[in-house]
Image (cartoon, grey):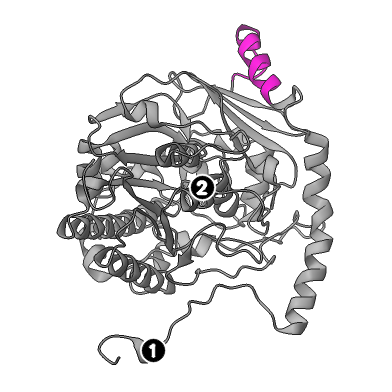
Amino acid sequence: MAGQTGDKPNILLIIADQMTPFMLEACGHVGARTKHMSRLAERGVQFNTVYSPSPICVPARSCLMTGLLTSTTGCYDNGDPYPSFVPTFAHYLTNAGYDTVLSGKMHFIGADQLHGFNRRLNTDIYPSGFIWSYPLLPEDDPEAMAFDFAPQYQAENIGPGWSTELQYDEETQFRALEYLRHAPEGPFMLTVSFTNPHPPYKVPRKYWEIYAEAEMPLPHYPDDMDDRYSDFDRAFLRWYGLDRKDIRDPRHLTAMRRGFAALAHYVDDKVGELLDVLEEQGLRENTIVIVTSDHGEMLGEKGLIQKRSFYEWSSRIPLIIDYPGAAPATVDTPVSLIDLPATLIDIAGETPVRPLEGRSLLPAIMGEALDEVPVISEYHGEGIMRPSFMIRQGDWKYHYCHGSAPQLYNMREDPGEWANLAGQPEVAAIEAELNAIVTGGRFDLEFIAKDVWGRLAQKQVVNAAMAANGTAWDYTVEQNASGQYVRT
């Protein structure tokens, strides 16, 4: 790979938030028009079966950064940090000579707002304190809900407009393009992380007009759907208030999917702008481009919204890797976002000082077949507060929630996850095999069950003191306005 960086390629990692692949044309589905991601997939390697290691923002991103599972780092929910002494891909790439830079959202919690990046080009969109941890809802208050997300998914609140989230992504893009137009001589690793298409579904008018009348695929609801819900599902129906607020009306479902598609189209155009500037600056053929997301979005599937679920629309993500010189390909073997840091570290020629829990995808990028290994996703935090796992191995997918009945699905025969086969004699062997991955000693389930509760009181003390002191860890960009533009 020839270019300004010699032997080491540049790396551009583009992350969208809450972007399910099941609504993207680039992933073979009906919904958002994604010509730039589609073009990238045509010349790159597209991984078709990719899972989030935790279907929620902060834990998923901790896995993306460290290559370790959330049960390893203790980053269980959106109010958890992970230790600063744990090396991230940014640390390894920095040590390999890369300029490691972040533009946009990474949702770091705690005092470390860099985790190995040389610098950030803008601040984060969300606060960095321990304010995001919420325990279970009180049983004696049937009207309690943690987040009233339902209005964001109702037709009357979806349509053309502007939001803080759009403002944030505009700045994220501006800073990233500015960086690429003045790229360093040595290799760079630029992460550009958008908060869209995460709701609210307020959409710039030009994008809304594309989708305002568009036909959208709508979910199928069997007559007995409510009886099929697991304990895990029911916890989040109540968590979001969906046991009292209807989002199943086709009017709402159509509107939310139009809003999602419009914002995914908006993000796709941002991808196109980044690719264009790489081309303009002569960097395209020496830059690995990666597009992915942290987790998906249910968008009304099974009557659910948001993430936190192990069902496909929530736990599956897109992953496209354009590695100049590698042949275009598609990979159907299940993989995980947790494999990406191992891949980046491998590309940089570094060796992790501790074994990572993901594997490098570089062999697959170079055309080698991937072995089938269990893909693990975890969710232990807010709303459920007990150990919960998903295992995908081959055609099989297993949902485990501590103290509740499991779920087992054959994804080839039942991609919608409707026929729970757990407990049936004919699948006893595969169920026992997948259950053993969770319960066989690799994970300390009793420790996790206690730890998710034990840290809450400590966080509350810290939160109260920081509020009293008026202190915060939010990242501040150092900027000297007198030295900008032509004034020096």
Residue 412 locus on image (x, y percent) = 43, 19
**Placement of the N terminus among the 4 image quadrants:** top left
Q: Which mark is residue 481?
A: 1
Q: Tag 2 or tag 1, which sits nearer the N-term?
A: 2
Disc 1 element: helix
Q: Nearer the viewer, residue 251 or 428?
A: 428
Q: Nearer the viewer, residue 137 or 44?
A: 44
Say if residue 307 shows up in the picture.
no
Residue 188 locus on image (x, y percent) = 36, 55
Question: Which residue: 58% across, 65% down?
Answer: 113
Residue 419 locus on image (x, y percent) = 54, 23
**Residue 170 image-quadrant placement:** bottom left
**Range drawn in magenta:** 421-437
Residue 484 locus on image (x, y percent) = 33, 86
Residue type highlighted by circle 1: Ala
Disc 2 element: helix
Decide whether the magenta segment is chiefly helix, strand or loop. Answer: helix
Question: Which residue: 25% across, 39% down?
Answer: 41
Residue where numbered disc 2 is placed: 92
Question: Which residue: 34% across, 70% down?
Answer: 175
